[in-house]
């Protein structure tokens, strides 16, 4: 948790290559009914991780969507 606050993170693995998937662009939205609010975006590091997809937004209970740009 960055700065001790809860967040949304992700870890992407290249199962075909047997290693972390670096350089994957990921976006995060909070879903509210038919609307979606952009929460943040990032690119996976050399270990295939993004530690905080919320940026300056606070994590609140609800539904979230992650999109992974793979090609």
Image (cartoon, helix red, strand yellow):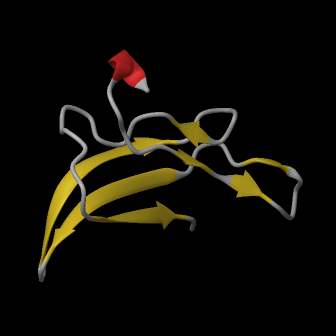
Q: Residue furthest front?
A: 61
The image shows residue 11 at horizontal and vertical percentages of 61, 47
Q: Quadrant of residue 55?
A: top left
Q: Residue farthest to the top? A: 3
Residue at image point 19% right, 56% down: 38
Q: Quadrant of residue 56?
A: top left
Where's the N terminus, which quadrant?
top left
Position of residue 30 in the picture relative to residue 49 (left or right): left
Residue 38 placement, left or right of 68:
left
In the image, 15: left or right of 59?
right
Q: Is residue 4 left or right of residue 61?
A: right
Q: Position of residue 54 (x, y in %)?
A: 29, 41
Nearest to the observer: residue 52 or residue 22: 52
| Vertical side of 48 occupied by 18: above or below | below
Coordinates of residue 13 in the picture (x, y in percent): 73, 53
User: In the rendered image, which quarter contains the C terminus?
Assistant: bottom right
The residue depicted at 25 percent of the width and 44 percent of the height is 59
Count of marks placed on residues: 0
Residue located at (19% from left, 38% from top): 58
Image location (x, y in percent) of residue 9: 47, 43
Residue in front for this viewpoint, 13 or 9: 9
Q: Nearer the viewer, residue 23 or 52?
A: 52
Q: Quadrant of residue 23?
A: top right
Q: Is residue 64 above or below residue 59?
A: below
């Amino acid at each position: 948790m960055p700065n001790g606050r809860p967040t949304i993170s992700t870890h992407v693995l290249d199962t075909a290559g047997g290693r972390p998937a670096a350089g994957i662009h990921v976006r995060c939205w909070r879903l509210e009914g038919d609307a979606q609010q952009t929460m943040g975006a990032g690119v996976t590091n050399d270990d295939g991780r993004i530690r905080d997809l919320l940026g300056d937004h606070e994590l609140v209970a609800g539904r979230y969507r992650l999109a992974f740009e793979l090609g």
